[in-house]
Each structure stands twice: as C-alpha cells, then as structure tokens.
Image: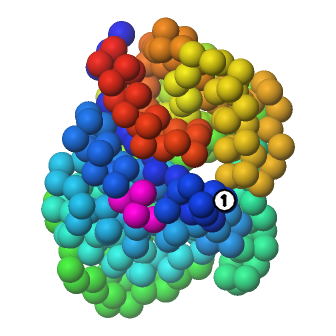
C-alpha cells in the first residue's frame, strides 16, 4: 500500500441545509482543527444556482487566513464553465498569493448524472452559457487561465473568448503556476463508452491531476490506467499526474445509524434520493476496521489523495474521530 494523503472537505452547503447545526463559523473552525489534527488539505465545493452554497473562493480565502500549511482546494469548481476565465484567473491568483502558494484548482464541467444533483441546465442558461458545449468551454478556459498566469500579455482567438493584449496582475504565488486538476466522473462506468474515454483522455491532455467520485476501487483503477496510457501517448510522465478520490466517511460502530445519517446528509446535499447501493458505495461507514478496509481498497487502486467529507451534522466530533482513529492507520 503506497503512501496516501487525506483531505478534509468542508460542507459549505451545510449552513443552508442544516442552519441550526452547521454555521460558517463552524466551517472555519473545522479547517483549523483539520490542519492541526493531520489532514493534508482542506476542500470546499462549488456551484451557484444548481446547488446553492457559500462561494468557494471567498470561503477559501477565509480558510487561508485561519490556516498555515494545509493545501486549499475547490472540489470541484462546477461553475468553472460559466465563470469568465479572466476573472477566474484573477481571483485564484489572489487566493494563491493570500495563502502563500497553497492552492489547487480542480475544474469540472458541472452537471452530468442524476447522482450529481442540482439543476445545472438552469444555472448555465441564466449565465448565458451553452450547457451542451461546456466541455469545449472548459478546455478553452483552462488554456486562457494557464496563459494569463504565466505570460505578461495574452492574445487568444478562441471559439468562446477573444483576448487581445490581456494582462493579469498579481500573478500567482506558485511558479510557474498553481496546479489545475480536472474532474472526470465516468458514472455509470462503462469502459467501452467512447465519451468516458474522451473525458479521461482530456485529463491527461490538459490537467495536472485527476479527481473523481462515485467509482468502485476497480473502476478507479481502470480509469487511472486509461489516463496514464493517454499521458504516455502525449509524451507526458504519467507519474506526475495526481490521482485523487472525492469520498465520504461516517465512523460509527452503530452501522445502521451511520447509514441513516449519511443518507439524510447526502440526500439533502444533492437534493435527490440516493439508493442504499450508492450510499454504501460512496461512504466509508461503520466501524474503524471497516472504514480502514474500504479506504485501503482505493489506495491499492492508485489513489494518492482521498478527500473526506463527514456525512453527519456532528462535524467537529467526526473530524476528531477520523483524525484519531483513521489517519494514523495510514
């Protein structure tokens, strides 16, 4: 079993779905406690109308001011295609400066399967962005952001954006630029599906790492294999690509209670009704031994980073339990 890092995902929809139990002050406290208890990174989610929450970069700036060493990431920036790339490059460069180079930008297209939850088509429509072309928009945005972060002046003639003598200051703290990872969630996973392979190939082509979710360990291993294969074709070292899993945990010897809490939490978070199969697959739940075994399966499949969201309203208590009983096992 190779070395793995663990991230703490803050539930920044929590104050909206559990206003009497999860507050913005609590989110910042969780970030502080996560840092001192052994988590390598702190993450927040993102979307605007589809799944309302506290805005990701603003919240991360507050987290940056309350922490010192943890990496800071958005998992994932579902609004990436509707945000103007100049503004995204600008705000993220500022966040990278504030945090002294601790940021990881994880881009994704937004929408997708029912399991993703939320009405992304309405969100895209209100931003005046073609939902059906979001993959191409995402790729163009990444090209522009990379250029703005690394060049003094940018000229760009794309399908969606035209830039002439565009400049960006401040540049990011990280040199040459902050890492950009890409989400590809091939769910339901069908290895023969050409659209799934295109999404995984895109990771190898435009990104510095991969983040995914809702996959079994076997599917994760297969997807990572495709990405590495495509990277080799492009002449890139596949070992330089990060491989991360967005996951959930509810550590409780009462497995039935852990399941009930997790289902209530995730159903509210994603405004859907998950099947027991999805809950049991997407959450490490139950005893310490069972949770460790589940995480080990993903590590053996190639995960280098696993971000953990606590599927409970008892966030501080669960973070403490996970830090004391799960992290030392790795």
Q: Secondary structure at mark 1?
A: helix
Residue 204 in view here: no
Looking at the picture, how far across and down is residue 247, in whole percent? 54, 34
Q: Nearer the viewer, residue 188 or 28?
A: 28
User: As displayed, is residue 233 above or below residue 148?
Assistant: above
Horizontally, residue 211 falls left or right of residue 69, namely right
Quadrant in the rendering for residue 327: top left
Quadrant in the rendering for residue 19: bottom right
Query: Is most of the magenta stretch helix, strand or loop?
Result: helix
What residue does disc 1 label? 17
* Quarter of the image with the N terminus in it: top left
Residue depicted at 63% across the width and 41% down the height: 185
Q: Is residue 168 magenta?
A: no
Residue depicted at 34% across the width and 78% down the height: 90
Residue depicted at 28% across the width and 51% down the height: 32
Horizontally, residue 179 falls left or right of residue 130, namely left
Q: Nearer the viewer, residue 211 or 276?
A: 276
Q: Nearer the viewer, residue 139 or 219?
A: 219
Residue depicted at 75% across the width and 60% down the height: 118
Residue 44 in view here: yes
Horizontally, residue 201 falls left or right of residue 304, namely right
* Quarter of the image with the C terminus in it: top left
User: As displayed, is residue 35 above or below residue 89?
Assistant: above
Horizontally, residue 35 falls left or right of residue 194, namely left
Query: In the current view of this chain or complex, which residue is farthest to the front?
Result: 20
Residue interval drawn in magenta: 24-28
Quadrant in the rendering for residue 266: top right
Query: In the current view of this chain or complex, which residue is farthest to the bottom?
Result: 164
Looking at the picture, how far across and down is residue 246, in whole percent? 52, 38
Looking at the picture, how far across and down is residue 40, in whole percent? 28, 39
Looking at the picture, how far across and down is residue 124, in whole percent? 71, 74
């Amino acid at each position: 079993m190779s070395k793995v890092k663990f991230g703490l995902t803050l539930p920044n929809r929590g104050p909206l779905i559990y206003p009497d139990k999860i507050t913005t002050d609590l989110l910042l406290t969780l970030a502080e406690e996560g840092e001192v208890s052994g988590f390598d990174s702190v993450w927040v989610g993102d979307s605007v109308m589809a799944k309302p929450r506290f805005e990701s970069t603003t919240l991360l700036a507050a987290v940056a001011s309350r922490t010192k060493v943890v990496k800071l990431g958005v998992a994932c920036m579902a609004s990436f295609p509707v945000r103007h790339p100049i503004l995204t490059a600008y705000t993220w460069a500022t966040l990278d400066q504030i945090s002294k180079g601790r940021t990881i930008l994880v881009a994704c297209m937004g929408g997708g399967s029912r399991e993703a939850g939320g009405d992304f088509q309405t969100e895209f429509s209100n931003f005046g962005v073609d939902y059906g072309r979001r993959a191409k928009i995402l790729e163009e945005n990444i090209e522009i952001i990379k250029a703005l972060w690394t060049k003094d002046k940018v000229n760009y003639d794309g399908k969606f954006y035209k830039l002439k003598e565009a400049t960006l200051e401040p540049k990011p703290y990280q040199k040459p630029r902050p890492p950009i990872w890409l989400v590809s969630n091939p769910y339901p996973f069908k290895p023969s599906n050409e659209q799934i392979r295109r999404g995984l190939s895109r990771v190898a082509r435009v990104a510095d790492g991969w983040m995914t979710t809702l996959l079994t360990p076997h599917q994760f291993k297969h997807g990572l294999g495709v990405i590495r294969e495509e990277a080799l074709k492009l002449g890139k070292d596949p070992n330089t690509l990060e491989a991360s899993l967005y996951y959930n945990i509810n550590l409780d010897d009462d497995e039935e209670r852990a399941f009930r809490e997790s289902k209530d939490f995730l159903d509210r978070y994603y405004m859907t009704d998950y099947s027991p199969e999805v809950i049991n697959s997407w959450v490490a739940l139950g005893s310490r031994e069972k949770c460790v075994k589940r995480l080990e399966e993903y590590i053996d499949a190639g995960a280098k980073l696993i971000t953990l969201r606590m599927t409970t309203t008892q966030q501080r208590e669960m973070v403490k339990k996970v830090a004391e009983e799960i992290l030392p096992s790795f």
